[in-house]
Amino acid sequence: MDFLRPASWEEALAAKAEHPTAVPIAGGTDVMVEINFDHRRPEYLMDLNRIGDLTEWEVGEDTVRLGASVPYTKIMENLRAELPGLALASHTVASPQIRNRGGVGGNLGTASPAGDAHPALLAAGAEVEVESVRGSRRIPIDEFYRGVKRNALAPDELIRAVHVKKADGPQQFSKVGTRNAMVIAVCAFGLALHPETRTVRTGIGSAAPTPVRAKAAEEFLNAALDEGGFWDNGKIITPSVAKRFADLCSAACNPIDDVRGTASYRRHAVGVMARRTLTWTWESYRGTRRASEGAA
Amino acid sequence: MRVNFTVNGRPQEADDVWEGESLLYVLRERLGLPGSKNACEQGECGSCTVRLDGVPVCSCLVAAGQAEGRDVVTVEGLADFARQRSCGTGACGGTSLDEARQWQAEGTDSQTGEGSGLSPIQQAFIDAGAVQCGFCTPGLLVAADEMLERNPNPTDADIREALSGNLCRCTGYEKIMDAVRLAAARQSEGV
Amino acid sequence: MPANGAPTKITQGTRTKGGIGESTLRPDGTLKVTGEFAYSSDMWHEDMLWGQILRSTVAHAEIVSIDTSEALALPGVYAVMTYDDLPTDVRNYGLEIQDTPVLAHGKVRHHGEPVAIVAADHPETARRAAAKIKVDYRELPVVTDEASATAPDAILVHENRDDHHAAHVPHPNIVHRQPIVRGDVEAARGRADVIVEGEYTFGMQDQAFLGPESGLAVPEEDGGVHLYIATQWLHSDLRQIAPVLGLPEEKVRMTLAGVGGAFGGREDLSMQIHACLLALRTGKPVKIVYNRFESFFGHVHRHPAKLYYEHGATKDGKLTHMKCRIVLDGGAYASASPAVVGNASSLSVGPYVVDNVDIEAIALYTNNPPCGAMRGFGAVQACFAYEAQMDKLAKRLGLDPVEFRQLNAMEQGTVMPTGQPVDSPAPVAELLRRVKAMPMPPERQWESSEGADVRQLPGGLSNTTHGEGVVRGVGYAVGIKNVGFSEGFDDYSTARVRMEVVGGEPVATVHTAMAEVGQGGVTVHAQIARTELGVTRVTIHPADTQVGSAGSTSASRQTYVTGGAVKNACELVREKVLEIGRRKFGSYHPAWATAELLLEGGKVVTDGGEVLADLADVLGEEAVEVEEEWRHRPTEPFDLRTGQGNGHVQYSFAAHRAVVEVDTELGLVKVIELACAQDVGKALNPLSVVGQIQGGTTQGLGVAVMEEIVVDPKTAKVKNPSFTDYLIPTILDTPTIPVDVLELADEHAPYGLRGIGEAPTLSSTPAVLAAIRDATGLELDRTPVRPEHLTGTA
């Protein structure tokens, strides 16, 4: 095994081009476990910790450019307003120690369906900025996940940042695990209201081979909210709409039975989380509306 | 490969490090600092918690090469670290990265902690009966000390959240809660 | 307080600081908080090698061939050993039945069985070498439960059994069977107004001590070996190790290294023999440290169990009879299974008066992971089932579950199903009264001005509910555990106590082979020496095999038995010191001859408080030393047909009240509070007592809601050998645990004390389950209860 220590992004890209099998390591949460347990013996290990740019973020007009290695702790502490769904998801990642080191780049690189960031990114809407010596490109988050622990990266590419849409409405994230802390997701759900476009987006984790959106549920809810004039009148969403949305979210799952939970439970739990997060975000939306009307 | 970094205020060098070794392995097996414990090697127990440039991390998940040039505080250096902090300029206001880097051990053997008194959190763990087998203790001490640095008056829920990455199998955590409350109380009384 | 207990008789005064009854602090505390305390995995030696074990990847197979040539050829590899390299004809070991191969011989019987061992200059070299060993397996069918294991044509896990249980078991795949019959169950059933039945399942729990198995074996010049090891019983290890190495016991020296928790998981050998073999083969020190994955295969687990119960009761709430069958899965090797069967059967009734019983407990041989000792040892599984039955009965009778239990609670004088009368306090009803009387935790603690604090809700940080679906439930349970080794076992301990003057001050040194695993035995030994010898300074000598056996740190027995041995040795030392005093100073004061003399505060005093001499003057240059074995009163084996016999030494009792909040829609549980009341006889160190109770309670909580080793029934392979998927409670899962300690002396025990470590692990689990049933209205007949069981999605 060789240990590569690129001092800059350019050096990292050059190294990755020269050694496409090199395994990038930043927070170490996934890679070190695989090494410690002898599941993986990469030819090259490439440390990304020396590249300061990766731990920086910029809040732009419409998006936040989040460096791939910005620790989850920083997201929780600094980006709660701009990226509320991701901040909530970050708070559920493993333990404080791991949140201090792990970043979204690791979740995206591993592309495990259980990665906590995925549902929040899917719901918020994001693009993954990847780069190689051949050039840079942005992959829409919906096209990023390609299979169980497979993503859209070419062998010579590295994840540099993720561009996440700034929240224009309430967002929520919820995750089921059989412990009250430090737990891998049995399944997870992210929901974002986008009042500007009058749309709702979702993300489901650990309930299909890849992180997925519940598109049929989104379409149903978008239509229902539109028809009922809910965005304007701020009425409480009717239970039947919420239930139908929850059922469609459950239906979007394609889970398996495993040691963490049954497929049947995952479908059920995603439905419950969908209904609850819809209630929480919608209540919050109504609250903001009332507050802004009050102010006006 | 060779790795150089600072541990408990002293420069350290490890030679012939296999590239797959963790920081934890290097501390324990190459630098004679076995205080950080190896209990799961997968970031699920917190027994190996050290501060890396001031930040609590699982040293089993840091590749040794990633520690190059960085500053590490282990349980062996905790007493000195706490003393330095209480005497330092930023009194309890948190440790900046620069402060963390500037910090040096004073006249003690960083391998054993000999010649140093205990930090308030260490003393509180003993006094409250928070130590049984003690295997989780080093990691808990490093995590709890850092929390009290950030949050000198934690609620019970704050303590539980801050220590939720550290497993203990002996105590049922009640005496650990007592210890952290005790350390916080003593800290606020300036004892 | 019910007046069952006599006040504790302490012959020595209490004027010596730091004696029994005080919450003195651990002597190893400072070392443990500074990181200096040397655990077995911290051992290091110049030129040491690293050992690695190759384990079977399948559960049941014939080994067709093993090729180690590539592994041996790897640079940095010093030795590769298989069964064929073992030095003597003794190639098996085991606690009671020597059925466990040191290295697999022609066959593997469970997933993860050791097949070959490697020593190399770096752990990675050792791992690579192990990976290069080629093992050709021919897989065999697996037996994984009672039906498959006891079928007439079942494949036998062990052919040609010749152990002492083989003759009386109904099938060769049954390790041991213990029936207990008493009274007339059929007649009693006729008197019952209600009969409830239940079939319960207890999952496989892991001890999950935090310090994985590890140790260092150092070859010695005399051809022997010195093993630094984390274990629960040095001399039991020694007895099993030496014959395999072909060495006399005196050439195998053992020193207890720091132990990172045990809970029963270190009663059996793990890497001990392997490290010694490699050290003797290479002539170099060899260190072996399991990682967490390997640890799940490296020690036995708590027996999973199926329990079939029937209880009857009259309308007015009196139990008429109990019938039960307890089927424990012992896995591939016997380990402690026979004794676990003895406990499960003899304690299957619980702390209740039931005159008519028909009980059967068996342990199976299967191809599942071997199971053996874990805190609670057979009594845990039974308690889960009989307490569920008590709630069912109370419900059927329309009685309050606590009152119903109190109505049937045993007390001092009750006769156990084994015919053994309970001859010390058994405050079962009182313990229940006390937990019930504790104030209830406030409702809806998660509510705050800033909204719901998810940390206080089911799901915790995962943000699954802000109060929706959350229902509170309350449940009670009480249990009975035996203390000490039972069934006629010669259960003794040895203590060597020395007293001399050092630097002008009398100092006592206590040397035992007791394994300090975190429980605080070392603290208590120093307290006993202070109380008995009137000294302030006590040195606790490291535990090793240079002194006689202390027995096991298990069965809640060490404070009782090794504590008893230390007390006894101190008393003998005291007599000798007084003899010296009489010889030297007897002529100066008549009280030397006439008064009851005590050692207190470094002085010899009369029972009237008059100081006769300083201990330093009495001892002068002399040192007094005593090494002596000490035994509790003997027990008897249970009759193999009737289960009758005075099998147990002492019983201990704890009761719990669990308050839970369940997210009934998602099936997530938050335990809000787990209150415990326990009778400890005499709290030698109240701080440690409470710590033991809280720790035991939390392990019971774990197996109620999350902890289970999952074994694939088709392949007998372990599916979750990691801390990612075998979950133990975090600090956010663990509630406040108020503890009410009752001290009713047992006149048969030293200081009246009662072994305490295990009882709280028993009743915690069924109390949590009862609370979840209360919240959800579900029957819940298995533990751990998982979200799918609470949501109909299993």
Image (cartoon, rainbow, N blue to C red):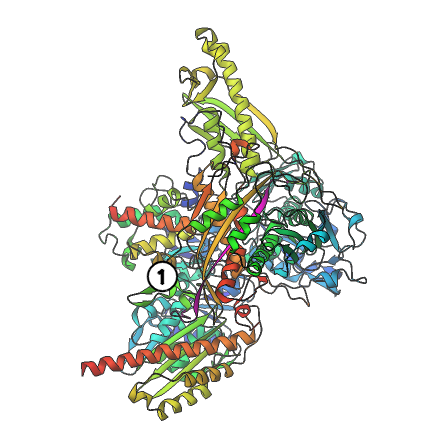
Tell me: C276 left or right of A43. Answer: right
Q: Please say whether residue B74 is visible from this viewpoint.
A: no
| Front residue of this view, candidates C449 and C270 | C449
Quarter where residue A81 is shown: bottom left
Q: Residue reaching furthest left? A: A296
* Mark 1 surroundings within 10 Å by alpha-carbon count, few (fewer than 14), some (14 through 19), many (20 or more): few
Q: Nearer the viewer, residue C720 or C641?
A: C641
Q: Is residue B6 magenta?
A: no
Q: Quadrant of the C terminus of chain A?
A: bottom left
What residue lies at 56% left-to-right and 53% top-to-bottom? C207
The subunit carrying tag 1 is C
| Pick the front one: C665 or B100 | C665
Q: Position of residue C678 (x, y in %)?
A: 49, 44
Q: Quadrant of residue C731?
A: bottom left
Quarter location, residue A77 = bottom left
Q: Is residue C240 above or below residue C621?
A: below
* Front one among A270 and C354: C354
At mark 1, the secondary structure is: loop
**Residue at which label 1 appears:** C445
Q: Position of residue A100 (x, y in %)?
A: 37, 64
> Residue shown at 36%/87% (left/top)?
A199
The question of residue C483 being in magenta is answered with yes
Predominant SS of the magenta segment = strand
| Segment tinted magenta in the rendering | C463-485
Q: Residue A54: percent from the left, percent from the top? A: 36, 72
Q: Residue furthest top?
A: C587
What percent of the width, then of the height, locates residue B181?
33, 50
Question: How many discs mark residues in the rendered view?
Answer: 1
Which residue ends up furthest to the bottom in the rendered image? A227
Q: Give the amino acid type for the residue marked by disc 1 in the picture.
A: Gln
Q: Is residue C165 left or right of residue C232?
A: right
Res C484 visible? yes
